[in-house]
Image (tube, coloured by chain):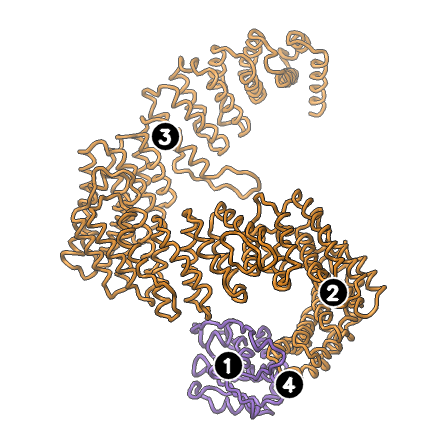
Chain colours: A purple, B orange
Amino acid sequence: MNSTLENANPLIYERIDRRQFTGTELDDEIDDDFDPREVYDHIRNIKDPEHPLTLEELNVVSESNVHVDEENNLIEVHFTPTIDRCSMATLIGLSIKVKLMRCLPPRFKIDVKISKGSHSTEDAINKQLNDKERVAAALENPSLLQVINMCLKDSI
Amino acid sequence: MTDTRSELVRALNESLLNESSLENFILSHGTALTSPNLDERTKGIETLAGYIELLSPGSLGEIETEYLTEYLISRLSDHHSFIPIIAKSLLHLSRFFPISNKQAISIFTAIHREVANQQLPIQERFIIYQLIGSLFSSHLEAFKSINNDFLYGFIQIMEGERDPRCLLLCFDLFNKVVSSLSLGHLEEEIFAIVSCYFPIVYNPTKEKGIQITRDDLHEALKKCFMASSSFAPFAYLLFVEKLESDVESAKLDAYDMIISCTPVYGKAVSSFLGSIWSAIRFDILRINVNKISEKATQAMITVLLSIKNSPELSDKFLKEVLGDLDGALNKLSLKLFGTAIQFLATISACCDYYMKKIGSHVLPILMKNVIFDHSSEPREFLEGFNHLFRSWKTVQSNDLFPRIPDQEILLTHLLSLFDSHENHIRLIAVECLYNFVQCPFKWESHEEQALAHGLLFLTLSEPSSSDDRLRNKIRDLLSEFSAKYPDSCQKEITQNLLGKLPDSCDLTNDDLERLLRLSEALKCCLQANQLAEDSSKKIANLAVQLFYQSQADTALVKKVKKSFAECTCQIINSSNLEIFSKSILSPILKLDHELIDENLNEIVSKILQLTSSSCKICIFENFLNSLRTMQPSQDSSPSSFASSTPPTNLSKVIECIICNSSIDFSFSWIDLIQSILRHILSPDANQLIDSLAVIIEVILNKSTDQGLVNLTDFLDTQLNQFLQDTATLTPSIRIIISCNRGLVIRGGEFSNFFTNQLLNLMQNQNDELIVSTIAKNFVPFHQDFNYYNHKNGFNISPFYTQKYFYETCQPLLKGYNESTEWRKRSYALCLLNHLKNLPKTVIRDEINKFQSLTIFNLEESNAPANQMTALDCLNHMVEAHSVTLIRNISGIINRLLELSKASPYLEIRRKSLDCLTTIAKTINEITLLPYRPLVLHSLKSVLDDRKRIVRYACTVAKHHWTLIGQPV
């Protein structure tokens, strides 16, 4: 990792409150569908590899950029790096992907993509992130896994 | 050395044991005292010093004291090693024996001539100062007779002292000397011995214990400077010199000295006005206000006050000051306007004389810029008014400056600024008026009226989107206006606001906005005005309607409710107590009882919080009496204001009041409980029982030990009778449970009064429902009941959970071991409820005993309550001491996984996942690693649970289990 920060002074956004469970969510008889907020809650507290800030605080991820299609078992997450030349974008994307793989039932297909026009090497990153084999290979690399785990450690 | 000491002690003991007189002592040790041999003499003098120290006060006559003193004085010139011993003995003699004036002078002269004080060690110098201090206090007249000789001697003895402890003593002595003796031509010399210490430079080392600080020395030195007004010419020179210094502490000390000394030195300051002002001007005209500029301003005030009685001098000086600041006041580009006006505002507030002088000079400049010339930057000048008014409001008497020039024009202009589109201008205008109103100026009635109209307009037109700061400032201004001009406020504002209140409140947002504005404004006006009964009722009625009509509790609705509750409280507190019962609670009592629960607690608790205690008691007694006199049957004739009250409503209101207020006043509680118990037999007992049980519980919890003696006996007799009857069995058991809860949480002598009764019922009752109800409620925990709160007068014993556990653990375990099926489960539930609430330090010792019971209850699929409580206990145990659970960890994990997947209850699934999380967080990785694959595999299916709350819990558990053994 570089010793100097690529974006030393990022804009910091407000955090949303913890989700409160009310009404039908506490009724055992009624099923709760997966919703974007639920998926967003899994990823919003992931730490940025460069800053002691979460992806939510840096506005890298937002609830509106999470799409859930329960019928087709599809979840799509778009993330936006703070700067368009961010070299950490792949690592951030990988962290999101791993976190969702760990937190969502295996029936879902998870697509993590970089928001359109937000990065100079957008296509390459998207390709890497959605290649199952590359992701599996990355997770077999102990040092990379350690970095990802560091980002995910306090994401609950 | 040791030999000498022991000899000395022996000699002293002998002398004292033989009750030897001084004469005998001298006869026996005379040779040593006059021996030509130095060692012998030293021994003799030490023995004599020891002897003197042991003498009780008054045991020596004048002649004996005189001889002793003479001898000791003569020894001072003998050898330098005798000085400390002799000084100590002389100090003792001077404190406890009659030394003559002549001898006092001799002692001082001998010290002055024979002792090179500054060459002595610190301890010995300290004794010398103590000796001089003691002699000076007791022989003042003698020293006055040698006035100048004493002063010379004192100067020489003290000169060059550097030890802080000695200095404190010296400064104190200096004060006494200067205030008692005439300084004559020695003023400067005397002043010089203390002036050399100014400013104090002292950095104490960081040692433990009480230390002398720089401030202590500075304060002591300040008193020396203040000791005589004749020091003024030398002192001011010194202060001015230090004011020019670049060292911040020196400047601060110099200002501090000026602030303290100027009132003592009086007009002497007149010769130094120019130089002091130069230094002050330099320090105050700084853009950043700091400690120095604050001190400089204070110093200026002191200087001005000291020359106030010389009009010519003060006018001349003020002219110079104002002339120097004219540039800063007129040229905004210098950026010094704010600091200059703030300075002038502060100094002008020191008395009405300067208020008039400075005000007459500054106000025309501000008026010219704000009103007549329409400056492009009105904000700066408005701030100027603000500074002046803010400072002037503290001026107590104002005979010289009753009205400011063009007061009416200024008022009209400030009111016209309310129309400004710029929020900050409106903000400053309101703030300016707020301070203006508080100033001691006289207002014409039409001015009061104009301001009242302006305020009314501002209150009613204030948009909802307006700045919170502006809104608060308007409220403050209104409160201030109503306090200062209550009649105008009542006539012009309050009546108008009341007229605009609707008779009933609709809940459209616009109405609510308007209601909020009105109630907030009324609240301010009510602080000084008392309302007519009709108006009070109207407000209270609206408050009640609001609390009961609003369905959606949005932030706005909450604000309106709060505001109306506060208004009502003000009415109640201003002695209109009837409003509470007639207009607030009576309508509540007539409502449908289902509506009561939702809002009653909110309104009653809010009102009780803000109501004064004497009012609370009156309110309380009214309602308690109503309940006491209410008959259980429908055709009864209850008391006056609760005549048409359904009993359920009344009991709920009383429950609410009793929970939110202390009951430390005398009332016939037994009568009340008797009345409550009569209702058990009534047809609506089922609806009433919950409230009535809580009322009794709260009475027991809040009563004194003395009161409890009769209450418990009475309840015991009554409830035992009810237990015999099958019709009243269930309600009476519910009351016993409540009583037990109130007393256990209260702690003390009566804490387990009803516990044995509950244990007996659990053992002997054959109704499963009754036993399980008792089991569920057997272990009370105050945090499960939101009304338990120290603030509301509840008694909550700090260790009641442990105490109750140890008191009931044995009978519960016995019952558990001896019973079967549902009764066994009930005992288990009691024990688990105990464990759940025990502090971690206590549960640690009990884990071994209760581990199997907890794990066994996890299997009780027929008893979900037991399963849930067992999961709570397990979680608690893992957190408290996970090591003890390791031998069973495999079984525990398997059981938890099974529960998280298969239990039909979401709470059980969630709690088992929480347990898995706690296990992953607390037990070491090596132990858990073998179970990791199994857990992760099993949790995969739970991730797809149909309840979101379970999925969230599963995510957390899986996250922690995933990280076990992973590189982090």
Give the position of the C terminus of chain B as an image quadrant. Answer: bottom right
Instruction: State the separation of the CA atoms marked 2 and 1.
Output: 64 Å
Q: Is disc 3 on the same chain as disc 4? A: no
Q: Amino acid at mark 2?
A: Ile
- Label 4 is found on which chain of the structure? A
Foreground residue among B556 and A137:
B556
The image position of residue B199, as x and y in percent, is 39, 38
Residue found at the far left of this picture? B372
Mark 3–mark 1 CB contact (< 8 Å)? no
- Label 2 is found on which chain of the structure? B
Q: Which residue matches tag 4?
A: A140
Residue B20 image-quadrant placement: top right
Q: Amino acid at mark 3?
A: Met
Instruction: State the separation of the CA atoms marked 2 and 3.
Output: 85 Å
Q: Sequence order check: which comes first, mark 2 or mark 3?
A: 3
Q: Amino acid at mark 4?
A: Glu
| Crowdedness near tag 2: few (<14), some (14–19) or many (≥20) residues, C-alpha within 10 Å | some
